[in-house]
Image (cartoon, rainbow, N blue to C red):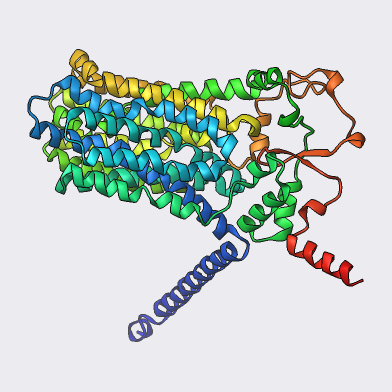
Amino acid sequence: MLSDTFPDTQGAGRARAASAAWGDRRARNMFATIKGFWKVWRYGDLYMVLAALAAQSINISVGFCQGFSAVLLPQYTHEHPNITYEQSSWIASLGVISNPVGALLGGMMVDAVGRRLLLQSIVLPNLIGWLVIAFSETYVFLCVGRFITGFTIGMSTVSYIYVAEITTPEKRGVLSALGPGLVSTGIFVVYSLGAFVHWRKVAAICAGVSLLTPFLMYFVPESPLWLASKGHMKEAYISMFWLRQNNSAAQQELMEFTKDRKSGETMSFKEKLCLFKRRSVLKPFIVLIVFFIFQEMSGIYVILYYAVDFFKSVGTSVNEFTASIIVGGVRVFMGAVGACLINSFRRKTLAATSGLLLGMAMLGAAICDTFNGPPLVKLACVLLHVSFSMVGFLQLPWIMSGELYPQDIRGVMSGATSCCAYVLIFFNIKTYPQLEKLLTSNGTLYLFGVCALIGAAYCLWFLPETKGKSLTEIMRQFDEDRNDSDPEACFSKDKQYSIEDRQVQRRHSAGAAVSLEKNKDLFTPYWIEEKDEKTKQKE
């Protein structure tokens, strides 16, 4: 009888207790979030993030360049019905053929002029190319404009080098992953504009956005590791202090040079050539090139450059322009997801899982096409392919090209790797129409799916792990068989010097070799130096 009179007393009490506990947890989580933001602001991570965002903003223009052909070709062929299939493929592929030249040029310039100045200089080919496209009156001028804008894509890989050198190992992965995410953002914007705006106006908008990166880079410093490698220690300290907003952290990072290395200024030309024969250079180069081969053969860039025509040939019930916009939106969302996952999972795990899933998705689309399945199922499989590519298989080789090479030739080798990757992309884009004619659209889907599965196995077995490691630790993975008496694998023992007779050389955790005096006067802040000088004058 009592239970009937007071039926909910105990239940209500438990509910109130659970509600109070949930409120406490929510308050603690909110406090932890606020505390995290305060730490970012207080300990300088905010400045590091802002510098990374400024450098990665160039990838918005890269997305414009990569996605423009997908909206240009349908409109241009409608305006000019006499355009042949071969001419259409040249419009798409000329935006890629100049990428290797831009990558090589950027790789040679980045170590000479610096990361910051090169990122600002990219605006020249980018702006000129888009203006040529916007005002082109003939097919030839349109191709010339596409060719010039392709230099932007090739030279933009310097952003990954800059981000790798200014960030801490804990933040490097997610901030490097911003690059592919912003590329996807640029693609989504140009797809959306192309569905409603004439291609000439789209080109004019792209020309205006190209001014964003040089403007933002004006407010951030040069890479401290590049400055240190050139012997500009005072400027390197000021740059590092701006990024970390902490005097001791800046000094500690610049003093963490653990290996004696020979300065590049005292090397002969022959000895510099020997640097390229090192295991720490050749092995990552081969690993990345093979990774890029599987990436291109998985169909990622075919869908990117031929989005509208691809959906038309595959046959979906959704309008091809609408489908391309959906693909762009999916890329943006999954790019953000991939940036979050890259700090939580090992690089091998992400790459292998991404390749496996996108391969299965593409095979699903092929099987559905073989048995004349519902068009929406094919569209869903293609969207899954795009989604899974953004969590590892697309961005990881680009990110790792800025991580795996030694500091002294990082710019050149990153440029050479990107050059080879862009050659592969060009070959893939240029031959896709012929490949589709040879194998049919169904056969190309099977080919892309099988190549993605093989690529997933390759990543699982051969891809080096870089998550949470400093750039020096990453390079040591490739230097395990080096002789202690011959640290550069090219220099003879008689060229070793005593530490007591020369400047102490140390290596930063991110891999830059610089010469540091045994005293710490080089790292005394300039305002302290001026104060000491005034004190001495008064005495």
Residue lying farthest to the top in this orientation: 438
Residue 153 or 319: which is nearer the viewer? 153
| Rendered image quadrant of residue 4 | bottom left
Q: Is residue 529 visible?
A: yes
Residue at image location 50% in from the left, 37% down from the top: 399
Residue at image location 53% in from the left, 65% down from the top: 37
Does residue 52 appear to the left or right of 170 in the view shown? left
Residue at image location 31% in from the left, 50% down from the top: 208
Above/below status of 219 relative to 501: below
The percent coordinates of residue 101 (x first, y second) are 43, 26
Q: How many marks?
A: 0
The percent coordinates of residue 404 (x first, y second) are 58, 31
The percent coordinates of residue 441 (x first, y second) are 19, 22
| Rendered image quadrant of residue 281 | top right
Residue at image location 77% in from the left, 34% down from the top: 259
Above/below status of 46 relative to 96: below
- The quadrant of the rendering that contains the N terminus is bottom left
Residue 333 or 296: which is nearer the viewer? 296
The percent coordinates of residue 140 (x first, y second) are 21, 27
Residue 296 or 158: which is nearer the viewer? 158
Above/below status of 190 relative to 34: above
- The quadrant of the rendering that contains the C terminus is bottom right
Q: Is residue 453 visible?
A: no
Does residue 116 appear to the left or right of 295 in the view shown? right
